[in-house]
Image: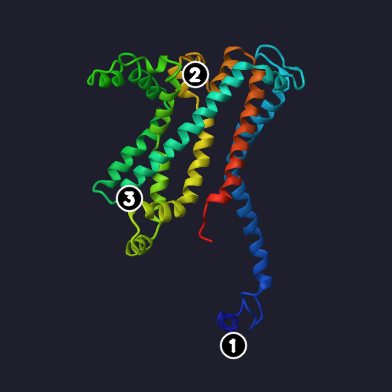
Amino acid sequence: MSVVSELRRVSGPRRGGPPGTSGTSAGDGAPGARPRRRGDGRMAAVFLAPWFLGLVLITIGPMAASAYLSFTDYNLLQPPEWIGLDNYTRMLDDPRLHKALVVTFTYVLTAVPLQLVVALGLAMLLDRGMRGLAFYRSVFYLPSLLGGSVAVAILWREVFGVDGLVNAFLALFGIEGQGWVSSPDTALGTLVILHVWTFGAPMIIFLAGLRQIPEMYYEAASIDGAGKVRQFFSITVPLLTPIIFFNLVLQVIGAFQSFTQAFVVSGGTGGPADSTLFYTLYLYQKGFASLDMGYASAMAWLLLLIVGAMTALNFLASKYWVFYGD
């Protein structure tokens, strides 16, 4: 006799039913189950309603409005006037836009790899099991929380100023410093250093990935005579490539959206000589300083296409260097 049949036998007759009738029959349970499922669905819809409302009002709605405005001449004061593709063709002849693209790509292709290298190095240092690991992990993560703030950007401008801490340190060795943020040759480099300094978030992710690598791989490599460097390139890096890829995608997207640092350090101008003119900063200048919101909307969609293309390129290239467990 099956378990289900035994349960039906010992459960006794259903209230109000003839003797021997099971109280757990499919026909009796179904009517009561359907209302409960409908109730669960309504409750789920209630809980999801704020998210869907935010999706429509905060994401989809503004994106649709921006897409429409990108085909118009709109200065925020008068109704938008439809001009077709003029804003997009205008980008081809905008030298400051081209300069902003060069500055932004230089920043992304320089700052992101350096940040990931520093983050991985510190993660490996913390993975050695030092005393007070939780404290150091929190301290190293703190720059990621503060690096995008206005206060840190102001502090950074003072640190690399003529009378800043960097020049004071160089003076100890008899080296005459300069205004690092006021020189076109070094201004962008100070922002790259600031981005590298915010290594906390990828470092924590790297540390979690390192903790998942089995220790037996390193023990076997040591028995075979492999040194630390060989173990790093033959074990750590291959097994960590999914984490490296994850951090790479996130940091590239975030770097393209950088704005506060360049705005504060350059005073909103992108100077000196447009050396810190990030794409987002130029978009802000066009949209809110020049009130050319139609052109700024078209620039926003170009940025979306650039970020999407870079992300797709990373995913396409990942099949050649990212190794998964399967």
Q: Is residue 14 left or right of residue 160?
A: right
Q: Is residue 274 above or below residue 147?
A: above
Q: Is residue 113 left or right of residue 37?
A: left
Tell me if label 2 and label 3 are in contact, CB under 8 Å: no
User: Dot 1 corresponds to which residue?
Assistant: 1
Q: Amino acid at mark 1?
A: Met
Whichever of callouts 2 and 1 sits on the residue coming sooner in the sequence is: 1
User: Dot 3 corresponds to which residue?
Assistant: 127
Q: Is residue 196 above or below residue 88?
A: below
- Residue that lies at the very extreme toward the bottom in this rendered image: 1
Could you tell me which residue is drawn at 57 percent across and 50 percent down? Answer: 320
Q: Is residue 181 left or right of residue 268?
A: left
| SS at circle 2 | loop
User: Dot 2 corresponds to which residue?
Assistant: 275
Tell me if label 3 and label 1 are in contact, CB under 8 Å: no
Instruction: Assess disc 2: are there few (<14), some (14-19) or many (≥20) residues with their C-alpha within 10 Å of its C-alpha.
Output: many
Q: Amino acid at mark 2?
A: Ser
Foreground disc of the pair 2, 1: 2
Instruction: Assess disc 3: are there few (<14), some (14-19) or many (≥20) residues with their C-alpha within 10 Å of its C-alpha.
Output: some
Whichever of callouts 2 and 3 sits on the residue coming sooner in the sequence is: 3
- Front one among 170 and 198: 170
- Front one among 112 and 47: 112
**From the image, which quarter does the C terminus lie in?**
bottom right
